[in-house]
Image (cartoon, rainbow, N blue to C red):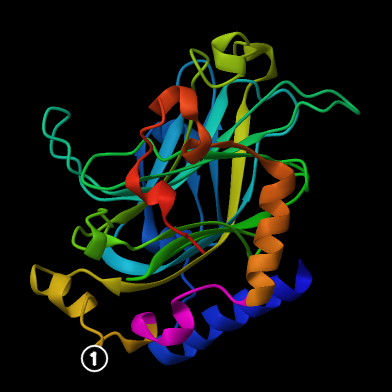
C-alpha cells in the first residue's frame, strides 16, 4: 500500500504546486453550525462531541466545484455503538420536496468494541447527484485502527471521477459517464461538512444495538485540514471550473484514472474489506441495477 500512497500524494503535490497553497486552518475555513457547546474549533484542530443532549457539526466557508479535500480524523474509541461521524461535501438543499442536491459522503458507523473483539467500525460511502443517492458502498474498517491515531480521509473530485481515499490509498471510484446519460456532479457548488450524531435507530446492527450513554461524551478529533479547490464565486464559476483551458490541472490526462499501483492497492482493499456494494445487491434492485453498475469505474 505504501507505493500507491506515495504516488497518490505525489499527484496531489503536483496539483498544489500548479494551483497555489493548499494548507488551511480549521479556524480560518470552518464554523460550527449546530451543537455549539459541543463544537470546539482551533487553528490546528477540531473536537466534535456527542452527549445525551446534542451532537455537533462544522461547515466550510467557501463553495467550490471540483477539488481535493483532506483532513485527519481520530474516531470515537471504545463502545461507539450507533455513534455516526460524518465527513462529506454537499451542495445546498432547497427542500425535501424538490431535492436536487449533490453530495459525496464518508460516514463512520460506530460499533460495540471489546478488547480483542472483532466488532469493527463500518466505513460507509455514498454519492448523490440531483438529489438521488442509493449508491452505497461499505467497508469493514479492520485493516487499521481508526480510533488509536489520526488517519487521512480524502475526497478527490474532478471532471472525470470522484475518488475516496484512506491514508492516501483509494478505496472507491465513481466515474463520469454523463455523456451516456448517467448523472455526474459538475454544476452545483459544494461545501465541506462534518458532524457527529446519534443514530441508534439504524446505525448499529440495523438498530438492534442502542447508544450506551454511560460512555459519553463521545469525541471525534480532527487535525490538518487541507483543501485545493476551484472556488465558486458566482454563476460564471460553473463555466470557469468546467473549462479545460482555465483548469487544466483538473483536466490533465494524468488525473483521468488511477495508476496501476493505485488500482492494485485499491483492489486488494476492496477484495478483503468491502462488505456491501449496491451494484451487487440483486434483492434490492431485483436485477434492475443503476446504469453505472454496468460500466467500469476504474
Residue that extends furthest to the front in the rendered view of this protein: 287
Percent across and percent down for residue 213 are 62, 13
Q: Which residue is mark 1?
A: 245
Q: Residues within 10 Å of mark 1 (few under 14, many from 20)?
A: few
Residue that extends furthest to the right in the rendered view of this protein: 116
Q: Camera-side residue: 177 or 84?
A: 177
Q: Residue at x 27, y 66 (%)?
A: 65
Q: Residue at x 17, y 36 (%)?
A: 99
Q: Quadrant of the N terminus?
A: bottom right
Q: State the image quarter where residue 235 is shown.
A: bottom left
Q: Residue at x 17, y 29 (%)?
A: 96
Vertical placement of residue 194 versus 263, above or below: above
Left or right of residue 249: residue 4: right
Q: State the image quarter where residue 215 is shown.
A: top right
Vertical placement of residue 35 versus 61, above or below: above
Percent across and percent down for residue 45 are 56, 55
Q: State the image quarter where residue 76 is shown.
A: top right
Vertical placement of residue 48 versus 19, above or below: above
Q: Camera-side residue: 33 or 156?
A: 156
Q: Which residues are magenta?
A: 250-259
Q: Is residue 20 visible?
A: no
Report if residue 202 lies within the magenta region.
Answer: no
Amino acid at each position: 500500500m505504501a507505493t500507491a500512497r506515495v504516488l497518490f500524494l505525489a499527484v496531489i503535490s503536483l496539483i498544489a504546486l500548479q494551483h497555489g497553497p493548499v494548507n488551511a486552518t480549521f479556524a480560518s475555513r470552518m464554523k460550527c453550525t449546530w451543537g455549539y457547546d459541543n463544537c470546539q474549533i482551533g487553528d490546528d484542530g477540531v473536537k466534535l462531541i456527542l452527549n445525551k443532549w446534542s451532537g455537533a457539526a462544522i461547515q466550510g466557508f467557501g463553495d467550490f466545484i471540483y477539488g481535493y479535500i483532506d483532513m485527519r480524523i481520530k474516531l470515537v474509541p471504545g463502545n461507539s455503538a450507533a455513534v455516526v461521524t460524518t465527513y462529506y461535501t454537499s451542495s445546498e438543499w432547497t427542500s425535501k420536496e424538490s431535492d436536487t442536491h449533490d453530495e459525496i459522503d464518508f460516514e463512520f458507523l460506530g460499533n460495540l468494541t471489546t478488547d480483542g473483539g472483532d466488532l469493527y467500525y463500518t466505513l460507509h460511502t455514498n454519492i448523490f447527484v440531483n438529489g438521488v443517492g442509493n449508491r452505497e458502498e461499505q467497508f469493514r474498517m479492520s485493516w487499521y485502527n481508526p480510533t488509536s491515531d489520526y488517519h487521512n480521509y480524502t475526497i478527490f473530485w474532478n471532471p472525470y471521477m470522484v475518488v475516496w481515499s484512506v491514508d492516501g490509498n483509494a478505496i472507491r471510484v465513481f466515474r463520469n459517464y454523463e455523456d451516456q446519460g448517467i448523472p455526474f456532479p459538475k454544476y452545483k457548488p459544494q461545501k465541506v461538512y462534518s458532524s457527529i450524531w446519534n443514530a441508534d435507530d439504524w446505525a448499529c446492527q440495523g438498530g438492534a444495538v442502542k447508544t450506551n450513554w454511560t460512555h459519553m461524551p463521545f469525541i471525534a478529533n480532527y487535525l490538518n485540514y487541507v483543501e485545493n479547490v476551484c472556488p465558486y464565486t458566482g454563476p460564471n464559476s460553473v463555466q470557469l471550473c468546467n473549462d479545460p483551458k482555465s483548469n487544466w490541472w483538473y483536466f490533465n490526462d494524468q488525473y483521468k484514472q488511477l495508476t496501476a499501483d493505485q488500482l492494485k492497492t485499491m483492489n486488494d482493499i476492496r477484495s478483503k474489506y468491502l462488505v456491501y456494494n449496491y451494484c451487487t445487491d440483486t434483492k434490492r434492485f431485483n436485477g434492475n441495477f443503476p446504469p453505472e453498475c454496468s460500466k467500469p469505474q476504474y
